[in-house]
Amino acid sequence: MRLGKRFSSILLAFLMLSLLALPSLAGAEDIGEVKILTNVTGGKDDEEMLLFAEAFGKGINGTVIMEKPAANYGEVMMNKLNAGEQYDLLYVSLQQLYDMQVDGILTDLTDWVKASPILGDPEVVPTEEWEQLTIDGRIWGGFNKTEVHKLPAVNKAVADKADVNLDEVEPTLDGYYELFKKLQAVGGEGFYAFNTHIPGLHDLQPWFAAADLKMGFAKNEDGSLYVPVATEAAIPVWEWFAKLYAEGLMDPDALINTTGDMRNKMMAGSTGLVVDWAAWVGLYNVRSGDNYPEVVNVVPLGGVKNSKGDFMLSRGDPSIWVIPINAKNPEGAFKALEYMATQEGGMLLSIGIEGHDYNMVDGKVVMTEVGLSHGNDHGAPVPTSRKFEFLVPLNPGFAEAMEFLPYGSLELSNANTATYKEIVAKHATEIITGAKTASEGVAAMQAELKDRSVI
Amino acid sequence: MRTPIFERSERVSRPFRNQLRPAERVFNWVLLMLVFLIMILPMLNVLAISFSSNTASQVADVTLWPKEFSTEGYTFIWNARNLGQAFKNSSFVSVVGTFFTVIISAMAGYVLIQRELPFRKAIATGVLITMMIPGDLTLVSIFSLNKSLGLIDSYLGLILNGLVSAFSIMLMRNYFLSVPESLSESARIDNASELRIFFSIYLPLSLPGLAAITFLDFIGKWNSFMIPLIITTKPELFTLPIILRQLTQPTDSTSGVLQVYDNARMAAIVITVIPLLLLYSLAQRFLIGGLTLGASKG
Amino acid sequence: MSTVARPDRAARKRLFRKMRQYRAIYLMIVPVFVYFAVFTFYPLGLGVVQSFQRVRLIGAPVYIGTDNYAFVLNDPIFILSMRNSIVVGTVSLFINLAVSLVLAISINEIRNRFAKSLIQTVTFLPYLFSWTVVGGMWLQILAHNGMVNNLLAALGLERLPFFTSSAWGRPVILFTNAWKQAGYFIVLYLASIVSIDPTLYEAARIDGASRMKQIRYIILPQAWPTVKTLLVLGATGVLRNFDQVLMMNRPATKDSIRTLLLYIYEEGITKLKIGTATAAATIVMLLTLVITVVVRRIARYEQDASY
């Protein structure tokens, strides 16, 4: 009896092995199974996630398995990796990229990228872009999407009420000060012309253009780092903020708002101008429901111009895919990266799955109701490839906002970015409320940044 | 006739019932009204927002009454996939888990009151120490441990994690301390087994305490989030807190566009709390009696 | 055979016999042993080991001795967090216990059963919500244009900078903490107050004592053991504030309220530095041990308890 059992289990194992071998006999270059741990990219619910993985797999000629933690991505990722789980692709933030690279657990992608007809093509991904993912001269990850910029978004409905022609707003600190005063005059009860999210310094870049300063870090000639917005050159801009606050033009709760609070106020019509992502210029309009366009009609502005006559806008930190060193199928993972930078991949990550989110009718894209509710965002509203063709019209306001993209540039980040923001925000609060003068505040910023070894 | 210790005037103005003087009573009521308002206003706010329409719920000034009354928030939550299943999962896991936790804690509490038990102090200290361990020390190994035990994606895993609570053990021990030892002594003389003594003497006499532990433990298990999050990957096993968190705090990338309206967030909160509230009103009767004995003998 | 050895052996023999006598009892606590061994002490051991390592998410960790501890203990933010945790945690515990006691006695004086039950339920409710909810609530209520400030303005008073001034950092935390936790303690107190022997009141009444005096000389002493117990149990949680400060910290107030667990989260968890996180957590555990022992001694807990 026992012998018979053993024989049948051997037979079973043999059968299973041969079944596994079949796919590789059939397809020419099946790249096998690619296991992905994702945070954002993918379907909106588990059902759609399966469809997404299927479409993805077809696109790369392999099988894609996608796993998405329900919440607390960082903690779950740590748990899985610590337990020895092997993933081929991991979704990470810039901060996590730095921390993981230091530990030496990422695959060096430099050579593959250079040799790749897709990722190595500067028309698809400009060469400077790879700098963000370069540490010590080597590339450690791939892009999930093209990060867009943040720019001022103003409520035209209020501007119209104030008889203000937005095209004539002077791109200087004084010009915007005048704008705010006019908006505030007609805004009504509880209205504030200017709103922002100070705790995250989101986003003050358009205003620091007045002093030619970039947010984030900057390098001295000797290579050491400093923080431009904490230097004396920044004092006029900080004084400007304090003035806005003192004269009731800035929402006092901007000092404690979350970005969600800020957006809520915009959509309710109780704020005149915020600085937010390009995509949100369109979304404010779409999401304010009946308020559009009488009460809320958001259009983009460029902010203040710098001494060269250009706007200065920030682009966001990249969202990144990395290949861990214990990946079972690194080649497959890289194929997936390349795919995401193609037109087809870009469509998957933006408008979604054919047959589910949209259908091709006479060669044109027709969104389904499900697709529309997903806002054309399955991880990459603006896909990685610069050659990507948008087959679906962008939300009203978004297209105009995208025209400002050339003015957007990246902030220099490193592992201490969170700390620098915390320090600057703390003293900024004191400057803005008037507890300190701008020069005292800036001096305090410098001191603390040095104290905590950030610079 | 007893000599009154206090002033004659005090006796004359003494009210018929044993109560505070009128002035004191008024002060008492005022104080409690204030407390009542402080407690309830924020929560009325939550309720009001949950019953407002999508766009109205975003406005900062919804205070105590819904703006543009609507149940859109609740519909959003209701239509979430797996909500019903999550409810069932939470109920099953919490009920079964609490049942076993209470039994195990009660037994352990009984053990800790045996005066002559060798190493009793050491055991009690060991139990107390488990209350001092910060979660971060063990956070990263949760998945790994459960994987080696084969508990990933299983109801057994959800129930076993968190099954023993030092707090419940210490409380049960205190309730048992108030049961007269003479009862157990005479039972032992009559050759009753320990289990018998436990079940037929100590448990019945500590019913209020048991009820208290049951209620508090149930709340803990119902709201437990982190461990279930880490050890389940299959959506059909997600518990209520996980589904609600997933729904109302969508992760989006740096320039992401996802947003959940506030009314849905508040609706999720209300949905989580209602079952606990119902349980509380049920348990209120026992609670007063139960937690008494535990604490005052502590 | 020396006389010293014989008592030892005899003592050990008695011990073993006693243990055999209690074997049924030991059996009853076996599940607890097993559970704690597997789910608590084993991971604890792992964690402590990790605190002496540079833990990489993938691959073998490297032993670095006490480097993690040195890093943590030399970090001024850790020291700041420790100070905050101890001060805010202890004061919070005392405030919560005191306020709840006053309220419990207050509620006890209400004769109307419906009112009594209602206010008890209402005060208990906040305990059921998570800090994500409660924190968010109070951020809105105490905002510059929130309910409270609007009320102050309507009364002609100045609006208060609850979250934008470091002076208000701790008071806000202490108040909201009491708000959320009060109900729970109130129930515990009420429980012991309600079980006071009624004849005590009778005797006092006959002696002509007013209700106020009865409260002072009967209720308070009877509730005191409860206070002590909760003090000791609360001591194990003094350093545990995390969700509250995570939710409610803002740039201006963060420095005065940031706690040890927040430090572990920001420095360890989000930066994927497990070694740092576990080292700091071990220090927290040892600190908690010290605090609990001290509090137990102060409260003279041992007098009442039999262990």
Image (cartoon, coloured by chain):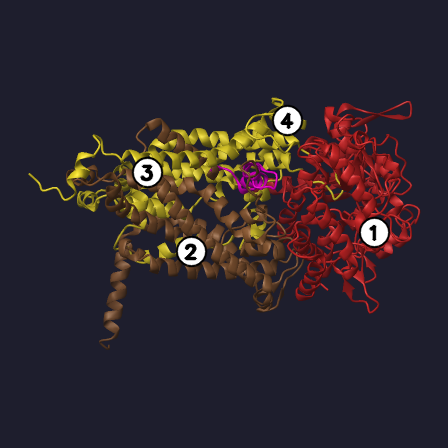
Chain colours: A red, B yellow, C brown
Q: Which residue is mark 4?
A: B76
Q: Nearer the viewer, residue B151 or B140?
A: B140
Using the image as rendered, state which of residue A17 and residue A311 is in the foreground.
Answer: A311
Task: Give residue A209's mark.
Answer: 1
Residue A383's x, y, as percent? 83, 40
Asked if labels 3 and 2 share a chain, the reply is: yes
Residue farthest front in this picture: C156
Mark whose residue sits in front, 3 or 2: 3
Of the two numbered discs 3 and 2 on the same chain, state the one appearing first in sequence.
2
Residue with the mark numbered 3 = B290
Mark 1 Cα within 10 Å, few/some/many (few <14, many 20+)? Answer: many
Q: Nearer the viewer, residue C72 or A164?
A: A164
**Mark 4 or 1: the one toward you:** 1
Q: Chain of mark 1?
A: A
How busy is the neighbourhood of tag 4: few (under 14 within 10 Å), some, or many (20 plus)?
Answer: some
In space, the residues marked 1 and 2 are separated at their CA atoms by 57 Å
User: Where is residue A317 drawn, in percent x and y?
Assistant: 77, 49
Q: Secondary structure at mark 3?
A: helix
In this view, the residue farthest toward the left is B1
Instruction: Please state which of residues A352 and C31 is positioned toward the viewer in this rendering.
Output: A352
Disc 2 element: helix
3D distance between C-alphas at marks 3 and 4: 40 Å
Mark nearer the viewer, 1 or 3? 1
Amino acid type, callout 4: Phe
